[in-house]
Amino acid sequence: MQMPIRSLQSMLRLLQRHAGKPTTVVPDGIFGPETARAVREFQQQNGLPVTGAADLTTWNAVVDAAREAHIHHGPAEPLRPLFQPMQTISPGEQNMHLYLAQGMLQALRHYYDGMPPVSVTGRHDEACTACLKWLQARCGLPVTGELDRRTWQHMVRLYAQTVGDGTGSYPVRITHPEGAQTPQRV
């Protein structure tokens, strides 16, 4: 019986965070006073009978609200372009995946000195080939200038690690100097 209660608590915690409130519900699988209080608060805010019990109507309302809140607080939906088995996009080819790859390469260029410029054209032109060769050499991959799955995986990981949330402020390394109470940005 703990799993449905833990699920309810996790959703209520997400809803508290989404509302900008301190998260007080702990997903421990025990329907204690704090969980009942959070259920009553949710019921009151959503025009439901305030009972503190997670009946089917309340459960469904919590699920719907949590699903919506997850859009704002959960991870962004990943993009996974479809590559056919052993597919390689070679110089001279045109492919819709190149728009994504060239966009990522342009963004990465802001962080890496000496990375050749590339335009977003959807065509595997000379500039794209030079940029991919540069990237492959630095990732320890075979330097072919082709876009294959291995190159794609390295490029996507590098993009996520380097570009972060796209604002230029994430990723940020946080350190805790000895005795410091709050983290310091470095």
Image (cartoon, rainbow, N blue to C red):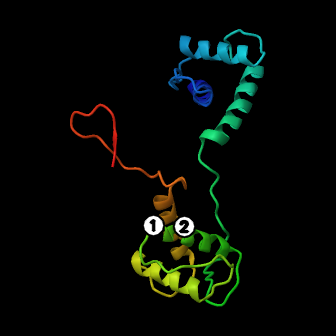
Residue position marked by numbered label 2 in the rendering: 107
**Would residue 146 be seen by someone viewing this image from the given angle?**
no
Position of residue 167 relative to residue 1, above or below, is below
The reply, left or right, for residue 25 in relation to residue 184 is right
The reply, left or right, for residue 116 in relation to residue 177 is right
x 60%, y 24%: residue = 5
x 42%, y 81%: residue = 137
**Which class describes the residues within 10 Å of circle 1: few (<14), some (14-19), or many (20+)?**
few
Q: Return the x and y of residue 38 as percentages of the image width and height.
A: 61, 17
Q: Which image quadrant: the N terminus?
A: top right
Q: Give the residue type at disc 2.
A: Ala
Query: Which residue is more in the foreground, 184 or 96?
Result: 184
Position of residue 48 relative to residue 26, above or below, is above
Q: Disc 1 vs disc 2: Cβ atoms closer than 8 Å?
A: yes
C-alpha separation, residue under disc 1 versus residue under disc 2:
8 Å
Q: Give the residue type at disc 1.
A: Tyr
Q: Secondary structure at mark 1?
A: loop
Position of residue 172 relative to residue 120, above or below, is above
Q: Return the x and y of residue 116 as percentages of the image width and height.
A: 49, 81
Residue position marked by numbered label 1 in the rendering: 111
x 70%, y 79%: residue = 95
Residue 134 is tagged as none
Q: Secondary structure at mark 2?
A: helix
Quarter of the image where one finds residue 87? bottom right
Q: Return the x and y of residue 125 as percentages of the image width and height.
A: 62, 87
**Which class describes the residues within 10 Å of circle 2: few (<14), some (14-19), or many (20+)?**
some
x 71%, y 30%: residue = 65
